[in-house]
Amino acid sequence: MSYVGDTKKHLKSGAYPLMSTKLKGMTSLEIAIILAIVLIIAVAVGWYLYTTFVASTATQGRLAISNAEYLVDYGQLRLFISNPGPQNITVKVAVLNGMQCTEAPRTYRVGQSDWYIVSCSLSNPVRGTMVSGYVVTTAGTTFPFNAIVR
C-alpha cells in the first residue's frame, strides 16, 4: 500500500497515512511562553537559595549577655558580655528602656568575657523590676537584654 497521493482518499478507505494532515503539536509561540515561565521560576528559586545561603554563611559577630543589672544608687548599667566569635566586636552604646546611656565603645576579642559598665539615667526606676534594653555594635547590629533594677 502506498501513501503517496491524496490523504483524504486513504483515510476514507481505512488506510492511515504516516503523517496526519492536522498536527496536534505546540506552535513555537506556545513553546516560547512555556520556556519563559520556566526560566522565570528557575531564576526566582535560584535567587531565593542564593540569598538564603549567603546570609547564613556570612560571618557576623555574636555577643552573649549573661547578666544585666541597673544599679539605682549609682545610676549604672552593668552588663556581663561574652564574645563567642567568630570575630572581634566593638560595643558602641547601650540603650536602656529607650534611653541611650553614655557612649563608651569597648572591643571584645573572640573568647573574651568581661563587664560593660556605663552610666544611665532612668526616670522613677522601681527596684526588683525588669527593664529591657539592647547594645549596639559599631557594625550596627543590636543585641537585646533584660536588666533587673537593684
Image: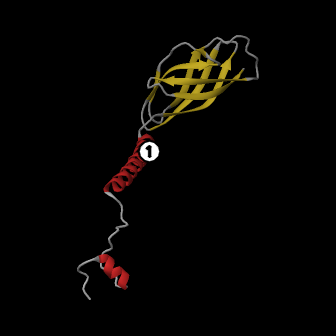
- Tell me if residue 39 comes above or below residue 4 in the rendering: above
Q: How many marks?
A: 1
Instruction: Indicate left or right for 68 with 2 as reference.
Output: right
Instruction: Indicate left or right for 148 with 85 as reference.
Output: right
Q: Secondary structure at mark 1?
A: helix
Q: Which residue is depicted at the point 33% across and 53% down?
A: 29
Residue 97 position in % (x across, y down) = 65, 19
- At label 1, counting other C-alpha atoms closer than 10 Å, the crowd grade (few under 14, some 14-19, many 20 or more) is few
Outermost residue on the bottom side: it is 1
Camera-side residue of 34 and 101: 34
Give the amino acid at mark 1.
Tyr
Camera-side residue of 15 and 107: 15
- Tell me if residue 121 comes above or below residue 144 in the rendering: above
- Provide the residue designation for mark 1: 48
Camera-side residue of 19 and 3: 3
Residue 52 position in % (x across, y down) = 45, 44
Residue 94 position in % (x across, y down) = 56, 20
Q: Which residue is depicted at the point 37% across and 81% down?
A: 12
Instruction: Indicate left or right for 72 with 144 as reference.
Output: right
Residue 86 position in % (x across, y down) = 43, 38
